[in-house]
Amino acid sequence: MTAEMNRYADFEGLRAEAVALRREGLSLRQIRDRLKIFNNDLLQRLVKGEPPPEWTKRPNAKDDLRARARELRLQGMTYDQIQVELGCSKSSISLWVRDLPKPERKRTREEASEIARRGWEPTMRRREEHRRETKRAAAEGIGAMSDRELFILGVGLYWAEGTKDKAHARRERVAFVNSDPGMVRVFAAWLDLLGIPAARRTYSLMIHETADVAGAERYWAELVGVDPTRLGKTTLKRHNPKTIRKNIGAEYRGCLVIRVLGSADLYRRIEGAWYGIVGAVASMD
């Protein structure tokens, strides 16, 4: 073992020397040169816990910003006001002033909310106008629909919202359930396209017991063009007092169930067409 290796083996002795030099105000480079230790990891371990001398610290470019942020906070400014004044991020401001007391609220919550609402109104109007224009342009872009397009749309619509056959539960029958009037209209038009007569279609309603059941029955009967007496027995969903209902108000009319009698063959055609669509999409790859 060389003398240098013996010296490295005396870690505590080396540490005592390094700490003494650190406390004298030497930098790591100076300690390295003085003790002839060129292993950076070992050098860091030797002075661990000893703060570097002030003269070795580089000035922080944000020190002035931090001091100014604290000054403004003490003057009662909010994070937003400080951000506008200094041009730095809120996260930095929060870090710098989090130990300082919050400024007293100069407005009530209601007043602040009203000011914020007035400030947002022009933006919200622009967003609403953009939203409506986007929808209008998209609707106009559809144009006329061919029989083939309606057929494919109807197959996809049924496969998303209709009853499906399962290996563990044979359900080769057509039953479509939805609460969206537009979806119901499209499905009814699809049945018309397939030549399904009105006599083979049955209708029933599923709705919460606290809703306007009679009004909902009249609404759906008118939508599909049948007398309300043609509707089957309505299924009422019992109220659970532990839950808060969101499906309330005049727009809530439950779900309409459309069933096609003697529809096993129709169901098989739907399922086959759906897998044909899937295969066609796969072939596009």
Image: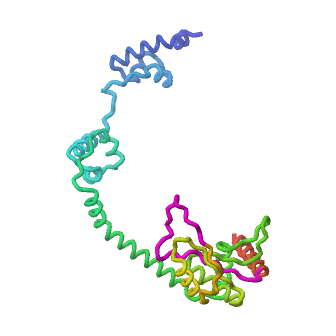
Residue occupying image coordinates x 66% and y 77%: 176
- In the image, residue 226 sits, relative to residue 246, either above or below, namely below
Q: Give the range drawn in magenta.
A: 236-263
The answer to whether residue 251 is magenta is: yes
| Quadrant occupied by the C terminus | bottom right
Q: Give 224 or 7, whichever is nearer the viewer.
A: 224
Q: Quarter of the image holding residue 157?
A: bottom right
Residue occupying image coordinates x 48% and y 78%: 135
Residue found farthest to the left: 75
The answer to whether residue 59 is magenta is: no
Q: Quarter of the image holding residue 254?
A: bottom right
- In the image, residue 52 sits, relative to residue 128, either above or below, namely above
- In the image, residue 69 sits, relative to residue 145, either above or below, namely above
Please give left or right for residue 58 compared with residue 195 in the image.
left
Residue occupying image coordinates x 32% and y 45%: 93
Residue 260 image offset from top left, x and y in percent: 71, 82
Residue 13 image offset from top left, x and y in percent: 47, 10
Q: Give 101 or 111, whichever is nearer the viewer.
A: 111
What count of labels does the image hold?
0
